[in-house]
Image: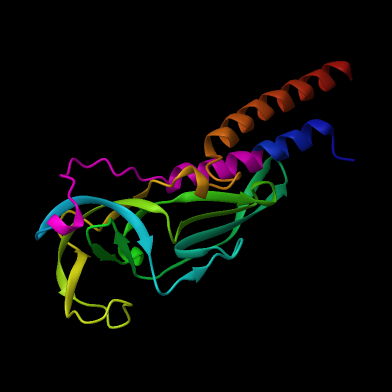
Amino acid sequence: MVPFFAVILLVAAVLGGVAAHHWRSRRRVDEAVRHAQIADLEPGRFRIAGRIQAERTLKSPLDGANCVFYEHADYKPTLGAAVMVRESARWSDGVPFYVEDGTGRVRIDPRVALIEASVVTEDGGLTAERRLRVGEEIEVVATFGLGEADPNSPYRGQSHEWCSQADDLGPPRITYRTMPDMVRPTDELGVFMGAASVFLVAVGTLLAVLVSLAS
């Protein structure tokens, strides 16, 4: 029978693994770039904000939510010399989408961007997914220019449109600004899980010491 303190350490390891994944995935868009409304864009590097709109979407493997990008990871607890969590699978996918701010729209391809996205967990932290969902508000720092319009775009009758472009400063960077009504109860638990992991490790270690002294 597995001692109770070993179970506590197992739970702590799971929480710690999810928290680590959460913080590894966060890439703050902190570059000092001038904010612009999309209608006022000109070729150059700007910061824009708006909501995600898309004709083509992806279904989240976790809960079927309509996404334009997701990165999904599964973890397995292992018991050996130490209790730990091992990543068993990871995959991602994305489709081009539009950012709309009420004054215009910009096409973004998440497959070539650095992304900070909301994180949702299931199965006690053994499944984690970060994603950008249709309707979420995001902020984008990128170099913008006029490119050929996407032939699959729902917006017809135009040959060119604003889109993000690669340059020497790096790929577009996206961070989410999700409104509270779009956040699931299991979103953004990285901080809580990290703290809970530390607490449970301390409790498990204390119990192990007490058991050792009692025997």
State which quarter of the image contains the C terminus.
top right
Residue drawn at (44%, 61%) of the image:
134
Q: Is residue 105 left or right of residue 70?
A: left
**Where does residue 26 sit, x and y in percent of width and height?**
41, 45
**Residue 25 visible here:** yes
Which colour assignment does the render follow? rainbow
> Closest to the observer: 181 or 130?
181
* 208 shown above or below 70: above
> Which residue ends up furthest to the top in the rendered image?
213
Q: Which residues are magenta?
A: 13-40
Residue situated furthest front in the rendering: 102
- Residue 181 is situated, as x and y percent measured from the top left of the image, at 51, 46
Q: Position of residue 141 (x, y in %)?
A: 24, 51
Hey, which quadrant is residue 39 in on the image?
A: bottom left
- Please tell me which residue is depicted at 68% across the width and 29% down the height of the picture: 200
Image quarter hosting the N terminus: top right
- 14 within the magenta span: yes
Q: Does residue 176 appear left or right of residue 158 in this picture?
A: right
Image point (19%, 52%), residue name: 37
Q: Is residue 169 left or right of residue 195?
A: left
Q: Which of the pair 87/140 is nearer the observer?
A: 140
